[in-house]
Image: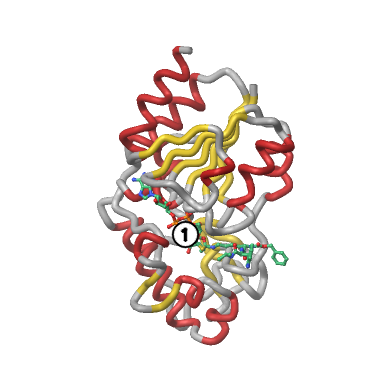
């Protein structure tokens, strides 16, 4: 048996991190689509860096901890004997802090930055400010957050596609189904892999119809019990 689990911002909401669509897609009155694009970074780099600096600061210095849903997925991965792949759209590191192992960050990682001059990818817990230098090549003002913006290619799609096309069980947790290609994973799992597809969310989403089964509520409340029952059966 093979399982793929997709998580979105909803799984981290109970840890204190804001979701995108629940905040009406706004940050300081800017639409997310206007700060999370390469074009925005070219036009207004300080605004974009400020957005990610604030979120990085909160993740590193705020009281942000993995919650019961993150921990339930660790238990599932450890105790279930089949193949397990966790794909998260989240750029926070709460899955790894909880102890998840086989994990792909589809949209990048907030605690890493990339140099546009030399391509160096480096862990980074500070702010990126005017004059920040790349630790690899020494270039200044060449660092960008290691995240995937609209119009950019998400990470490790080949590996994810292969896993989806042969999975037996697909779980989607706390994602609105607004953003592709992640929103299309359920279709791949269902129609290529023949998987049973289960959605966990506060409410129905744009892609709910594609799932066989729905669990409505907070993922931190739902998942520990679901995992317990699943492992027992
Ligand atoms: C709870 C809960 C609790 C709350 N318990 N649940 C038209 C059609 C199809 C596609 C496109 C199109 N036009 C453009 C596209 C492509 C575009 C796209 O999808 N646009 C849409 C807006 C339509 N996609 C892309 O550009 C992607 N790249 C791509 O397609 O490349 C292919 C390509 C490229 C170049 C050439 C050729 C092909 C890239 C997408 C990058 C997304 N980036 C972001 C920001 C970066 C990272 C960051 O800043 O964090 O990623 S956008 C933002 O949305 C972020 C998220 O990962 C992503 C998904 O959001 P998510 O996780 O679903 O969160 P929310 O807030 O939407 O939902 C939270 C859910 O949780 C809700 O449902 C709540 O109910 C629930 N919830 N509390 C359980 N306690």
Give the answer, above or below, for where 14 lies relative to 189. below
Residue 145: x %, y % from top left: 52, 67
Query: Does residue 2 lie above or below 43 as drawn?
Result: above
Mark 1, secondary structure of its residue: strand
Quarter occupied by residue 187: top right
Residue at x-position 65% and y-position 75%? 117
In the figure, residue 138 lies in which quadrant?
Answer: bottom right
> In the image, what residue occupies the spot 44% across and 75% down?
31
Q: Which image quadrant for residue 181?
A: bottom right
Find residue 44 and report its horizontal and vertical position in percent.
49, 85
The relative height of residue 120 versus residue 8 in the rendered view (above or below) is: below
Q: Residue at x 58, y 45 (%)?
A: 104
Q: Is residue 87 above or below residue 79?
A: below
Tell which residue pokes out farthest to the left in this image. Answer: 63
Q: Residues within 10 Å of mark 1 (few under 14, many from 20)?
A: many
Which residue position is annotated with label 1?
A: 110
On the image, the x and y values in percent for residue 121 come to: 59, 61
Q: x, y percentage for residue 10?
A: 40, 49
The residue sitting at the top extreme is 233
> Is the C-beta of the residue carrying label 1 under 8 Å from the nearest atom of ligand 1?
yes
Quadrant the N terminus occupies = top right
């Amino acid at each position: 048996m093979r399982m793929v689990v997709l998580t979105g911002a909803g799984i981290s909401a109970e840890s204190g991190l804001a979701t995108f669509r629940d905040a009406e897609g706004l940050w300081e009155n800017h639409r997310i689509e206007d700060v999370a694009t390469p074009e925005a970074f070219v036009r207004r780099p300080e605004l974009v860096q400020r957005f990610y600096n604030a979120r990085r600061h909160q993740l590193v210095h705020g009281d942000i901890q993995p919650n019961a849903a993150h921990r339930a997925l660790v238990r599932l991965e450890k105790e279930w004997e089949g193949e397990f792949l966790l794909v998260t759209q989240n750029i926070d590191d709460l899955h790894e802090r909880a102890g998840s192992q086989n994990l792909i960050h589809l949209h990048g990682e907030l605690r890493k930055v990339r140099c546009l001059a030399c391509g160096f990818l480096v862990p980074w817990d500070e702010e990126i400010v005017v004059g920040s230098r790349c630790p690899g090549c020494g270039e200044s003002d060449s660092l960008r957050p290691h995240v995937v913006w609209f119009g950019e290619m998400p990470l490790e799609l080949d590996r994810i596609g292969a896993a989806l096309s042969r999975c037996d069980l697909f779980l989607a947790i706390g994602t609105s189904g607004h953003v592709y290609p992640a929103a299309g994973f359920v279709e791949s799992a269902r129609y290529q892999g023949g998987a049973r597809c289960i959605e966990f969310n506060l409410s129905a989403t744009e892609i709910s119809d594609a799932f066989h089964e729905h669990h409505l509520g907070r993922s931190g409340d739902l998942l520990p019990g679901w995992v317990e029952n699943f492992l027992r059966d």
